[in-house]
Amino acid sequence: MAGKKDYVNSSVSDNRDQIEFHIKEILKLIGEDVEREGLLETPARVTRMYEEIFAGYDVDPRDVLGVTFDEQHEELVIVKDIVYYSQCEHHMAPFFGKAHIGYIPSGKIAGLSKLARLVEAVSRRLQVQERITSQIADILDEVLKPSGVMVVVEGEHLCMCARGVKKPGSKTVTSAVRGEFRSSAALRSEFLSLLKQ
């Protein structure tokens, strides 16, 4: 997670030698010459990348919301265009996009940057977009106990764009609604219209 609280996956750190060995073996099995100059440091680089892109395993997403504040604001709060990067659990291929979070406080608010940290904590592991969307909504609902939560996540999946059906530029959009958003079409409409601004 960006900023002062950068996390790494300690399981990767603890198993660095084994992971580097297996990356080297995979390179051999796909027909590469692991002794050529461009690949000599690849196993180490991939392992360092895994420490970062799988850092979500070492973080309880509920904890990243940190301290909440008592505040009587009871209107819609939206943080939009939170960029995320994740890895598809089916192909271990990247997918990425933007998350948009809206909630109606009922006495508690979180620091706005904490919502971005929540997205990172949930997305930096093997995932599917549908689960990312639901987990963000469920954690906000559990920790802040707001009147309502709505999360929309957009994603471009390399497992669909660069392989298989090969449809680059196609986007997947998922949503999760909790509380008042579930029963109020007007609230959902307000949230979606504010995303377009």
Image (spheres, rainbow, N blue to C red):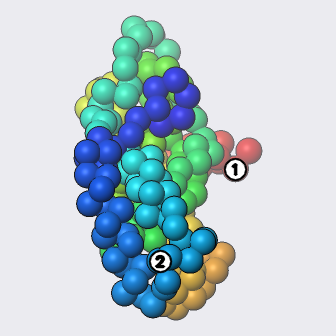
Give percent across and percent down for residue 186: 52, 44
Q: Which mark is residue 34?
A: 2
In this rendering, position of residue 57 left or right of residue 86: left
Q: Residue 184, can we see it?
A: no
Mark closer to the observer (2, 1):
2
- Type of amino acid at the residue the image marks with label 1: Lys
Query: Where does label 1 land, which residue?
Result: 196
Q: Earlier in the sequence, mark 2 or mark 1?
A: 2
Q: In percent of the image, x 50 and y 76: which residue is there?
A: 35
Above or below 75: residue 180: below
Q: In percent of the image, x 41 and y 11: which residue is there?
A: 69
Give percent across and percent down for residue 113: 53, 27
Q: CA distance from mark 2 to mark 1?
A: 49 Å
Between 9 and 113, the residue placed more toward the observer is: 9
Q: Quadrant of residue 30?
A: bottom left
- Type of amino acid at the residue the image marks with label 2: Val
Helix, strand or loop under label 2: loop
Above or below 13: residue 147: above
Near mark 2 (Cα within 10 A), the count class, few <14, some 14-19 or many ≥20, is: some
Specify the quadrant that holds the C terminus. top right
Give percent across and percent down for residue 18: 26, 60
Near mark 1 (Cα within 10 A), the count class, few <14, some 14-19 or many ≥20, is: few
